[in-house]
């Protein structure tokens, strides 16, 4: 589902990469073999590659076009980045900007970039290599990034520091994808309740990282929640207590995930996670004391 509408806002998906990422037993910190096997047929082939026994994931961005403003949500892994923590996303040479153009947008058309959090695969195209230096890719845009992630991921920051795994996986990311935005005067550090544009706001949902944010789009009586890495996979709708191994604060990550699922179910909102395959978005229904995913095939205005 590469284009749909929420009220008067046109949403376009721009894919950077897709493929097998990791085994379920590695990705999920709460993994239970019997529970996974019971659910596995539901996920094949859109969310799980059964023969390879790998979670299928996507790196993708979303352009929200209000008619007067073009907002890019998350910027993937980027090209030419050195990523020893996750070599799969290092040294990429993708045609992401060509795909952005195919969706109808040049880099200079983007007015606002929103990074849900400052992880390796959400800030990469913030910058691109120009004559050996990292320069803002979206030269006319303001970059909205979570204040609570700034000092946490800055190698020279104070206060709480990343977990050892977090520091290893995210090595180099702040230096090549965040600091150049700050140096160019394009960074705006924001928090809970920040209004991006009329009907578009940010909500703090910490846990995966301290600053993880959700973008809440409401227009014409319709609603979509762009949730970044609060959810990595539909299994976490069934089992919100299953964190990914990349969650910095496991307790708060579960709390945020449950809160988002409740919000989506009770508000009948589309849920747009960062890495879902299939149609790349879902709805959520309550089931017993928990939740179940409703796999979307059509969205009004598609």
Image (cartoon, helix red, strand yellow):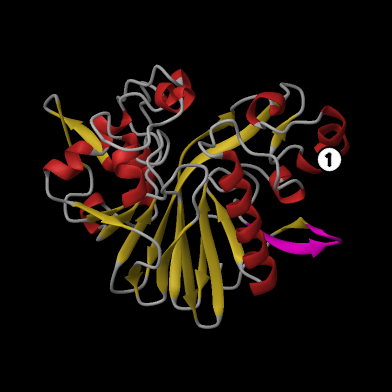
Q: Let me know if residue 286 is in the magenta part.
A: yes
The answer to which of 11 and 166 lies nearer the viewer is 166
Q: Main secondary structure of the magenta part?
A: strand
Measuring from the top left, give residue 20's x and y in whole percent. 61, 27
For image coordinates 23% across by 35% down, the residue present is 128
Q: Residues within 10 Å of mark 1 (few under 14, many from 20)?
A: few
Tell whether 80 sits left or right of 180: right
Q: Let me know if residue 187 is in the magenta part.
A: no
Q: Which quadrant: the C terminus?
A: bottom right
The answer to which of 170 and 275 lies nearer the viewer is 170
Residue 198, quarter of the rendered image: bottom left
Measuring from the top left, give residue 168's x and y in whole percent. 42, 21
Q: Which residue is mark 1?
A: 39
Residue 49, quarter of the rendered image: top right
Tell whether 99 sits left or right of 13: left
Measuring from the top left, give residue 38's x and y in whole percent. 88, 37
Q: Which residues are magenta?
A: 282-290
User: Above or below — where is 235 with respect to 268?
Assistant: above
Q: Which quadrant: the N terminus?
A: bottom right
The answer to which of 240 and 210 lies nearer the viewer is 210
User: Above or below — where is 191 with respect to 212?
Assistant: below
Q: SS of the residue at dot 1?
A: helix
Tell whether 136 sits left or right of 105: left
Measuring from the top left, give residue 285's x and y in whole percent. 76, 64
For image coordinates 21% across by 56% down, the residue present is 141
User: Above or below — where is 299 with respect to 236?
Assistant: below
Residue 112, quarter of the rendered image: bottom left
């Amino acid at each position: 589902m590469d284009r749909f509408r929420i009220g008067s806002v046109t949403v376009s998906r721009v894919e950077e990469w897709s493929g097998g990422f990791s085994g379920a037993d590695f990705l999920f910190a709460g993994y239970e073999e019997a529970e996974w096997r019971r659910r596995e047929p539901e996920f094949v082939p859109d969310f799980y590659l059964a023969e390879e026994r790998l979670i299928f994931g996507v790196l993708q961005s979303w352009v929200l076009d209000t008619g007067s403003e073009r907002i890019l949500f998350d910027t993937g892994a980027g090209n030419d980045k050195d990523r020893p923590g996750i070599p799969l996303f290092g040294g990429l040479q993708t045609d992401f900007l060509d795909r952005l153009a195919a969706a109808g947008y040049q880099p200079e058309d983007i007015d606002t970039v929103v990074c849900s959090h400052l992880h390796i695969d959400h800030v990469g195209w913030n910058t691109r290599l120009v004559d050996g230096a990292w320069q803002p890719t979206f030269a006319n845009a303001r970059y909205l990034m979570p204040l609570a992630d700034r000092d946490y991921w800055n190698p020279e920051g104070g206060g709480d520091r990343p977990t050892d795994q977090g520091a290893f996986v995210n090595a180099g990311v702040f230096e090549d994808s965040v600091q150049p935005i700050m140096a160019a005067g394009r960074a705006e550090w924001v928090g809970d309740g920040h209004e991006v544009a009329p009907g578009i706001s940010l909500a703090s949902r910490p846990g995966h990282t301290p600053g993880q944010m959700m973008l809440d789009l409401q227009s014409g009586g319709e609603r979509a929640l762009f949730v970044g890495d609060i959810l990595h996979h539909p299994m976490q709708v069934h089992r919100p207590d299953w964190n990914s191994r990349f969650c910095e604060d496991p307790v708060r990550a579960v709390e945020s995930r449950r809160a988002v699922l409740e919000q989506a179910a009770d508000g009948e909102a589309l849920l747009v996670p960062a890495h879902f395959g299939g149609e790349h978005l879902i709805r959520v229904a309550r089931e017993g004391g928990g939740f179940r995913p409703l796999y979307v095939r059509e969205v009004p205005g598609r």
